[in-house]
Amino acid sequence: MKVVVLFGSPRKDGNTIQLVHAFCEVLKHKGHDVETLYLNDMNIRPCQGCLSCIPEGICGIDDDMKDVRTYIMDSDVIVYATPVYWWGPSAQLKLAIDRSIAFFDEQYQSRIAGKKAVTLMTFADQDPTTSQPALDMFSRTFGGLGLSNLGGVEVSGCEGKVRLGEEALQKARNLAESIA
Ligand SMILES: Cc1cc2nc3c(=O)[nH]c(=O)nc-3n(C[C@H](O)[C@H](O)[C@H](O)COP(=O)(O)O)c2cc1C
């Protein structure tokens, strides 16, 4: 399998990356091809809503979303990894999601239908329902894009920089095992 991680945190040594590492280690160990895209380091402009991408699937903006698009097109599994920012994904990840309108054709059929999607999220609040609005957004987005939602791991109580507990890391490993 080819797996691409769309990593939405600006912190490469923060909380969400620990889930990504636990998840990816299992997949790499099983011989899968895993690539992590650090969206914060990439130049991804906001969608301009021109819809010129719809006929050919090619966005008119010449930026790093071209590379993200290629990775998504070539992958079997897309991992959406992000801290919860204001009950949603980070802006870094949302930019890539907005630009994913280019995966629709004229009939609003998805060019990436059938691929699989996973979510990995951390957030500060102790209340586990804090990630629910983001989970709902992902679920509907995956539905729109025809992606099969393989589930996710959400970790509450991640205020500041924390070391994630073994239980959380094991959940990420188990999720990887379930799809590997
Ligand atoms: C701009 C911003 C917005 C945030 N919004 C929320 C929020 O709505 N709910 C919450 O529980 N935590 C929120 N947090 C905390 C982060 O989600 C949390 O610390 C997360 O684990 C950071 O992950 P990272 O280290 O991978 O960046 C926010 C943090 C920032 C910087």
Image (tube, rainbow, N blue to C red):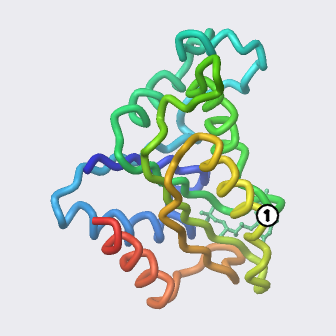
Residue 87 drawn above or below residue 4: below
Q: Residues within 10 Å of mark 1 (few under 14, many from 20)?
A: some
- Image quarter for ligand 1 equals bottom right
* The C terminus: image quadrant: bottom left
Question: Could you tell me which secondary element the residue under label 1 belongs to?
Answer: helix
Q: Is 85 situated left or right of 169 in this image?
A: right
Residue 95 position in % (x across, y down) = 68, 36
Q: Quadrant of residue 44?
A: top right
Q: Identify residue type, mark 1.
A: Pro
Residue 172 position in % (x across, y down) = 44, 75
> Foreground residue, 10 or 141?
141
Residue 136 drawn above or below residue 58: below
The yes-or-no answer for disc 1 within 8 Å of ligand 1 is no
> Foreground residue, 22 or 2?
2
Q: Residue at the spot x=59%, y=15% of the render?
A: 59
Q: Quadrant of residue 155?
A: bottom right
Q: Residue at the spot x=65%, y=27% of the render?
A: 108
Q: Residue at the spot x=34%, y=73% of the render?
A: 178
Residue receiving disc 1? 133
